[in-house]
Image (tube, grey):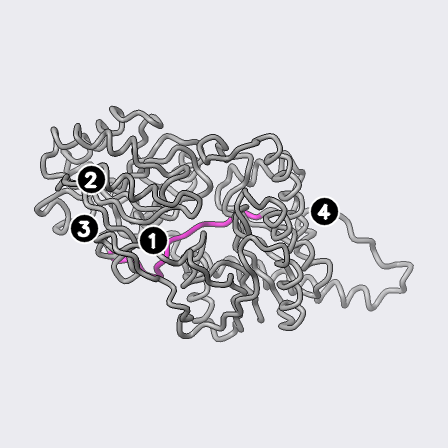
């Protein structure tokens, strides 16, 4: 099977690049798959900072070895539909798999370019002889626009509604939370929406080693792209109260600025200058991620809103780490869908956050119980099983297509059934 994966891809640092990398790595290991990644052109966005705050180039304009990458689209560009369609026609894949959020192709400051990019799956289905699938990591109906810093909400929602309808013109769309599927079915009468799983990034996760935690300090890990709906003010406010109950606690803040909020991470670091109990790691290299999670006593998610199933939460499960998270409906759904152990605090309430963290850090039994539950959840959603589900969908679609063509070739033209919008019509 020949697959084109359309996504941002390392060494690009844009949204979903890590997810695309792990999906691509799993597909590369399948001898029956011929994979080409249609990635974004590299830019200065790949600059980040090391643990000392010094700038480093995480891109270096070098492609990762072992992957066939064609960088054929550009962020914030109106030419992306033409460029992608041209490349897809040239490669002639069996499946074009889009790994998307609504801001994959452009920021809210370039709404026309963003909308044009989101029309590519529908255009590919219309003009290409291939199966199109979209993995949609969030839907606009579940995004808190104020928390995400979106202006002109009514106009943006109207455009997003049109973009969603366009995305649903792909052969099939998968979402990663049951609430998302329910919304698409009820609001848009969608009949080609599948429920997928975010999954963890390992094929065989290693059970947690509790001797690495709280020895000698309890590490509280916060990691992400900061400045929009992921913010640090509530966590910074809560941390002194945590130290009163758990003096050995240390806050590790890892990650970088969201690309729309330059300077945010640095401003928080500057405000805590001289505080030895808070460590700002900045950009964390992929090879350093395991040690970061394995030595953490708890992962905290101090979010104002959600834009889909959480990558840090799934990595916490992979390494068997308890989670403390803002009480956001999407994360409640995620915890219920996937059997995660999460302690929720009232969003924006620093006292509640410090209470949840303090209670957890003072109870070894609670830490172990939550860690074991999250690790059990991880074992049920390893990346090989996630990718196998996608490939089963694609194979089913291919067989249905072959059977349909055979059936139609055997019937006189006036007997051939018309295409309808019945359930799973996208799998024909």
* Highlighted range, magenta: 194-206
Side of 141 relative to 283 (left or right): right
Please name the residue shown 46% across and 42% down the image.
308
Tell us which disc is closer to us: 4 or 2. 2
Establish if 86 lies above or below 114.
below
**Which residue is labeled 1 in the image?**
379
Tell us which disc is closer to us: 1 or 2. 2
Structural distance between the alpha carbons of marks 4 and 3: 50 Å
Question: Upstream in the sequence, badge 1 or badge 4?
Answer: 1
In depth, the one of 381 and 12 nearer the eye is 12
**Which residue is labeled 3 in the image?**
295
Please name the residue shown 27% across and 39% down the image.
268
x and y, in percent, of residue 50 in the image = 26, 56
**Which residue is labeled 4 in the image?**
422
Structural distance between the alpha carbons of marks 1 and 2: 18 Å
Q: Quadrant of residue 94?
A: bottom right
**Circle 4 sits in a helix, a strand or a loop, which is it?**
loop
């Amino acid at each position: 099977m020949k697959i084109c994966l359309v996504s941002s891809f390392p060494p690009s640092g844009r949204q979903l690049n890590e997810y695309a990398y792990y999906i691509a790595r799993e597909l590369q290991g399948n001898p029956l798959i011929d994979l080409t990644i249609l990635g974004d052109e590299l830019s200065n966005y790949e600059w980040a900072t090391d643990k000392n705050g010094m700038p480093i180039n995480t891109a270096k304009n070098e492609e990762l070895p072992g992957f066939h990458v064609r960088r054929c689209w550009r962020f914030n560009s109106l030419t992306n539909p033409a460029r992608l369609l041209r490349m897809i026609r040239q490669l002639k894949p069996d499946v074009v798999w889009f790994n998307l959020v609504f801001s994959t192709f452009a920021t809210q400051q370039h709404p026309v370019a963003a909308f044009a990019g989101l029309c590519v799956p529908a255009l590919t289905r219309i003009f290409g002889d291939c199966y199109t699938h979209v993995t949609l990591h969030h839907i606009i109906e579940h995004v808190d626009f104020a928390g995400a810093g979106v202006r002109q909400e009514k106009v943006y929602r109207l455009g997003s509604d049109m973009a969603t309808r366009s995305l649903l013109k792909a052969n099939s769309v998968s979402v990663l939370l049951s609430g998302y599927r329910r919304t698409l079915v009820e609001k848009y009468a969608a009949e080609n929406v599948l429920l997928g799983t975010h999954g963890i990034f390992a094929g065989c996760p290693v059970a947690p080693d509790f001797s690495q935690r709280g020895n000698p300090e309890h590490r509280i890990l916060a990691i992400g792209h900061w400045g929009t709906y992921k913010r640090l003010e509530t966590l910074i406010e809560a941390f002194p109260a945590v130290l009163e109950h758990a003096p050995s606690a240390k806050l590790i803040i890892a990650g970088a600025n969201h690309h729309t909020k330059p300077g945010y991470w640095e401003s928080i670091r500057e405000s805590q200058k001289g505080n030895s109990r808070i460590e700002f790691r900045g950009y964390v290299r992929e090879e350093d991620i395991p040690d970061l999670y394995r030595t953490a006593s708890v992962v905290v998610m101090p979010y104002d809103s959600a834009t889909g199933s959480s990558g840090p939460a799934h990595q916490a499960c992979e390494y068997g780490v308890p989670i403390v998270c803002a009480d956001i409906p999407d994360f409640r759904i995620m915890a219920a869908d996937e059997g995660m152990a999460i302690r929720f605090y009232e969003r924006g309430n620093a006292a509640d956050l410090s209470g949840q963290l303090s209670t957890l850090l003072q109870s070894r039994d609670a830490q172990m119980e939550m860690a074991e539950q999250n690790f059990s959840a991880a074992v049920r959603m390893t990346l090989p099983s996630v990718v196998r589900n996608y490939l089963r969908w694609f194979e089913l679609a291919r067989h249905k297509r072959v059977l349909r063509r055979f059936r139609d070739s055997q019937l006189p033209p006036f007997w051939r059934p018309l295409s309808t919008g019945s359930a799973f019509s996208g799998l024909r």
